[in-house]
Image: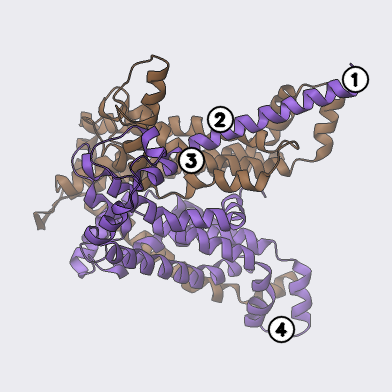
Chain colours: A brown, B purple
Amino acid sequence: MFGNQHRFTRGWWFIAPGLTLMTLIVCVPLAMGFRFSLHDVFLYDFRNQFFVGLENYRWAFRDPLYIASLKTTAIFTAGCMIISVGLGLILAFLLSSKLVRFRSTWIALFLIPFVMTPVVGGIAWRLFIWQQEFGLINQFTALFGLGQPYWLLDSETALLATIISNSWHLTPLAILVFYAALTTIPEDLYEAARMDGATPVQTMWHVILPQLGPHILFVSIIIITSAFREFDMIMALTGGGPGRSTSVLSIFAYTRGISNQDMGMANTVAFTMFLIMATFAWVYITLYRKLEAKT
Amino acid sequence: MSRTSKGSMHKSSTIWGLHIALAVWLLFSLAPPIMLLAASMNETALFRSPWDLLMLRDFSLNNFTVAFSEGDFWFFFQNSLIISVSAVVITLIVCVPLSYGLNKISPRQKAIVSFGVLAMRFVPYVVLALPLFLLFVQLGLSGSRVGLLLAHLAIHIPFATWMLVGFFEGVPKELEEAAIVDGCNPWRLFWNISLPVVRSGITALAILVFIMSWNEYLFALFLAGSDAQPLTIGITRFLGGAEVGAQYGVIAAYSVLIIAPVILFALVANRYIVSGMTAGAVKG
C-alpha cells in the first residue's frame, strides 16, 4: 500500500517545477559568484576579466581589513546569539507561568521588534535611543550620573550598541520558540519536581532546560545565520563605521564591490561567507540528528 | 496569620513580579517605535528631549505632509506593494505543491531534497546579491521589479518550502488513504483533501513572506536601480551625513508610514505569525 501510494500520488510532478526554479535562482548566482571570485573584475572596466585562480582568496586572508571584518562579524554574531537566547529563555519562562494574565496580548506586543522593518528599526535606534545628547539611553545614564557616551559615534562602543539593537530585533523569535516549546512539556514533569521540593529556579535548571536542548540549538542556529549575514540594521545604524568598527563581512563585501568597484574581491569575501555558513549548516544538521536520536 | 493567606500573599507578589518583569521588557521592545511615533507628531527644527517629544509639546502633523510631498511616498509605496504581493503569490504557487509533493515521495528522496532546501536557507543574502547585480546589468534587468522579485524569491522559496513541509506532515494519513480508496485522482487528493487541512499554515506563510519582502533592504540597494526602489530605499533619501538635524521629524513620519502595515499584521494576525515562526522548531 505504501509503495503504491507513492507511485499513485505523483509526488515528483508536484515537486519538479518548484525545485527547478529554486535551484536555478539560488545556484546560478552562487556559481556565478564563485566564478567572479576567481577573476579580477572591476565595475569600471567590466569587460576585461582576468582569471587569477585562488589569488583573490590569498589576498583576502592577507588583508588585515578582511581579518578585522571577520573578527567583527564573529563578535557581532556571538553577541547577538548570547543575548537573544539568554533573554529569550528568561522571558519565555516568565511568559509560560500559569499566573500570567493576558498572555496573547503580551505575545502580540512582543512580536513588534521582530516584524519591524530592520532599516527603520536601525534609524529609530540611531536617532532616538543612542543619540548622544537626547537619546533615551543617555537620558537614563545622565539620571544616574554615568556620563553620556557617544555610542554609535565612538568606535569603542559602536559594536556593542549595534549588537544590542540587533538583539532587540531577534529576541522575540527566541521568546516565541522557547515559549511554544515550554507549552509542550508535560504537566507531570513540573508536578514531580514540585513534589520533590525543588524551587522554581532548580526546576528550571535541572528539569526544564534539558528538555529544551533541541530548541536551544534550533534558535541558536537561526539567530547565528541571521546575525551573520546582517546588513540592513548595521547599515542604518552606523554604515559600518565609525572607522571600520562595525564593518561586518556583508558590509565589507558591499563596500569592496560597489564603492571600490572591485567585484572580484567582493565576490571572494561573499563566497567565504557562504563557506563559513555551509560549515555551520553541516555542524547543525549533524548535531540535530544526534539530539533527535537521543530523544 | 493563617497558612492560606500567607500563601496567597506570596502568590500575589509573584504575580506582580512577573508582570513587572514582562512590562520592563515590553517598554524596551516598544521604545523605538514609540519614539518614532512621538517624533513624527512634533514640529521639529532641532533635536528635542524624548520627554518633550512624548508629551507632544509641539504637536503638528506637518512631517507627514512633507514625507508625502517631498518624499515621493506613493512611488516607493507602489514598488514595495507590487513586489511584496507578487512575491507572496508566486511563492505560494511554487511552494505549496512543492512541499506537498515532498511528503509524497520515498523518505530517502525526501531527506535528500530537504537537505538541499535547508542548505539553501543558509546562503547569506550578499552572496546572491553581488552576482545578481552583475547578471542583471548584463541582461538589462537592473532597476526592474522583475529582477528584484527574482532575488526575493531566492530567499522565500527555500524558507517557505521548509516551513510548509512541516504543515503538510500534519495531514492525517488516514484521510488521504480513505480518499484514494474512494477513487480520488492525484490532483484532487492535493487540492480537495490535503490543501484544506493546511490552510492556516498557508495563511501564516503568506503573512511572513509579505513581511520579509516589505522589510527587505539589501537586495533593493543592489538591484533596484532608480525605477524599482521600495520604501526602505525611499527613506534613506532623508538620511544625509552622520546626523540628520532638522529632518528627523520627517524621517520619523516616513518610518511610521513604512512600519504601519507590518505592525498592524503583528497586532491582528499574531497567531499566524507565531505559528509560522515556530513551525519546524517545536516538532523537533
Q: Which mark is residue B49?
A: none
Q: Are marks 1 and 3 in contact (CB under 8 Å)?
A: no
SS at mark 3?
helix
**Can you identify the residue that label 1 sits on?**
B3
Q: Quadrant of residue B68?
A: bottom left
Compared across the picture, whether B265 is left or right of A203 comes to: left
In this view, A275 is above or below B12: below
SS at mark 4?
loop
For badge 4, the amino acid type reads Cys
Tell me whether marks 1 and 2 sit on the same chain: no
Tell me where residue B38 appears, x and y as whole percent. Answer: 39, 43
SS at mark 1?
helix
Q: First in sequence: mark 1 or mark 3?
A: 1
* In this view, the mark in front (1 or 4): 1
Q: Which mark is residue A86?
A: 2
Q: Chain of mark 2?
A: A
Q: Quadrant of residue A87?
A: top right
Task: Identify which residue, A31 or B206, lies in the foreground.
Answer: B206
Q: Is residue B108 visible?
A: no
